[in-house]
């Protein structure tokens, strides 16, 4: 391991400085994608990257690629990056930490006069949040071939403005074809957005993948009846059946190490003195691997088929997203870089650009704690020390990976 140290104070002042682009009275940041605030933070980043000797390229969807040359021009770059946009009530760390930490890596290497073998590429992915233009991770998805360029351009915000015209409005598009930039690997540093690292007093999460998700609608039909004159053993209470399924799904999730959430529940024709005859509810099931997801779905199906014969219910899957497993070599580099810091392997509960990037190139993520696990909130916060350690692990991961790939190519 080298003795190279990132400048945590410089990273922190960059975090605080860029928080003025969209800074709110509540102390948070509102920097919707392709807004005037987004234009300003992009310009800030380009100016800093130019001053650091990087060349700048943008693709036709405004994804930014800031390149620091390596010793070898024939090698594909190792990428670092995340996103600069925020939720309407966002904070100072979600997304931008991963970009500014990448800038810090480049400036640290410049200060020390060190050139990596591979070129380095700092990336800002357009529209990660999905807050202005749904869906989320739109342009890393387009880069990975999940969405077409036309599909992305046609997305509309709530005011009816298309992505394409918002992109032109702040002159954020470049001339590179989407997906043309290739990486030997990508590392994304991000705040955890959950409470695990803080609770376990650890600094680094080695993120091995992103949970898979399945969404379902369920309608249960029983029999509406009088609340006073229908004996308890003569009822087909749809809500009571739903209650059993909700607690059952929760138990399944705990047993199988996944997550189960019922976030919507509606009683058809509700009335306080009528036994509910029909209810509609949603299930959101998540797990780190496909077998776990499948077991949770099967368990839920079994619970449903065990309902009393005078109740009928049909589970309908309406959307799914498969689990993502990050690259073993990238993870090995992050683990080696984390050796002297309190760290653990973990799975991301939230979606990230890295999840789409991983479909095309070897990818992994690094988490640092955020206070109370809070994000998408003005009170979102991370400490100077944790941000600095995160950037240090990013730097060391990149250096270790640079040597790993170079040594392998020489074999
Ligand atoms: Zn984010």
Image (spheres, grey):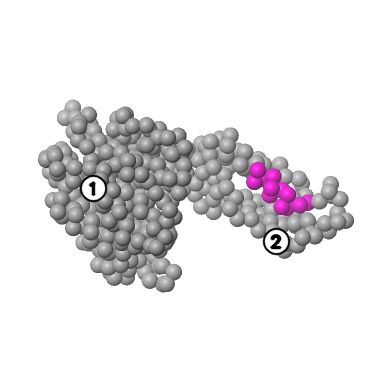
State whether residue 288 is above or below residue 283. Answer: above
Query: What is the quadrant of residue 57 in the picture?
Result: bottom left
Q: Residue at x 22, y 37 (%)?
A: 5
| Residue 380 makes an appearance in the image | yes
Q: Which residue is mark 1?
A: 10
Label 2: how many Cα within 10 Å (few below 14, some 14–19, many 20+): some
Rendering coords of residue 402 (x, y %): 21, 36
Labels 1 and 2: the sequence-earlier one: 1
Q: Which mark is residue 268?
A: 2
Cα–Cα gap, marks 1 and 2: 57 Å
Range of magenta residues: 236-247
State whether residue 34 is above or below residue 261. Answer: below
**Which image quarter is the C terminus in?**
top left
Rendering coords of residue 353 (x, y %): 35, 49
Left or right: 332, with 89 as reference point: left
Query: Magenta stretch: residue 24 in it?
Result: no
């Amino acid at each position: 391991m080298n003795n190279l140290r990132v400048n945590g104070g410089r990273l922190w002042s960059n975090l605080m400085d860029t928080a003025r682009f969209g800074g709110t009275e509540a102390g948070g940041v509102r920097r919707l994608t392709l807004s005037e605030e987004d234009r300003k933070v992009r310009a800030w980043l380009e100016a800093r990257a130019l001053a650091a000797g990087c060349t700048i390229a943008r693709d036709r969807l405004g994804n930014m690629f800031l390149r620091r040359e390596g010793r070898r021009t024939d090698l594909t770059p190792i990428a670092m990056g995340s996103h600069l946009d925020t939720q309407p009530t966002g904070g100072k760390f979600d997304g931008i930490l991963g970009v500014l930490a990448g800038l810090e890596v480049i400036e640290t290497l410049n200060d020390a006069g060190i050139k990596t073998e591979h070129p380095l590429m700092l990336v800002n992915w357009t529209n990660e949040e999905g807050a202005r233009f749904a869906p989320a991770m739109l342009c890393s998805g387009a880069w990975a071939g999940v969405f077409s360029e036309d599909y992305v351009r046609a997305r509309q915000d709530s005011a009816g403005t298309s992505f394409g015209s918002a992109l032109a409005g702040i002159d954020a598009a470049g001339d590179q074809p989407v997906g043309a930039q290739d990486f030997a690997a990508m590392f994304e540093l991000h705040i955890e957005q959950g409470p695990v690292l803080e609770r376990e007093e650890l600094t680094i999460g080695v993120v091995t993948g992103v949970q898979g998700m399945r969404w379902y609608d369920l309608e249960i039909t029983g029999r509406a009846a009088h609340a006073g004159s229908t004996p308890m053993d003569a009822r087909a209470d749809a809500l009571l059946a739903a209650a059993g399924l909700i607690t059952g799904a929760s138990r399944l999730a705990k047993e199988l190490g996944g997550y189960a959430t019922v976030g919507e529940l509606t009683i058809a024709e509700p009335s306080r003195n009528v036994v509910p005859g029909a209810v509609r509810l949603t299930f959101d099931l998540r797990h780190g691997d496909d077998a776990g997801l499948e077991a949770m779905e099967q368990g839920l199906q079994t619970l449903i088929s065990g309902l009393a014969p005078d109740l009928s219910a049909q589970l309908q899957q309406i959307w799914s997203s498969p689990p993502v497993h990050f690259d073993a070599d990238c993870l090995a580099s992050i683990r080696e870089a984390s050796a002297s810091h309190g760290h653990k392997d973990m799975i991301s509960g939230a979606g990230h650009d890295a999840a789409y990037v991983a479909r095309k190139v070897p990818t992994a993520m690094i988490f640092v704690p955020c206070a109370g696990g809070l994000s998408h909130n003005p009170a979102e916060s991370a400490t100077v020390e944790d941000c600095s350690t995160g950037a240090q692990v990013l730097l060391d991961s990149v250096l270790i990976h640079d040597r790993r790939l170079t040594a392998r190519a020489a074999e």
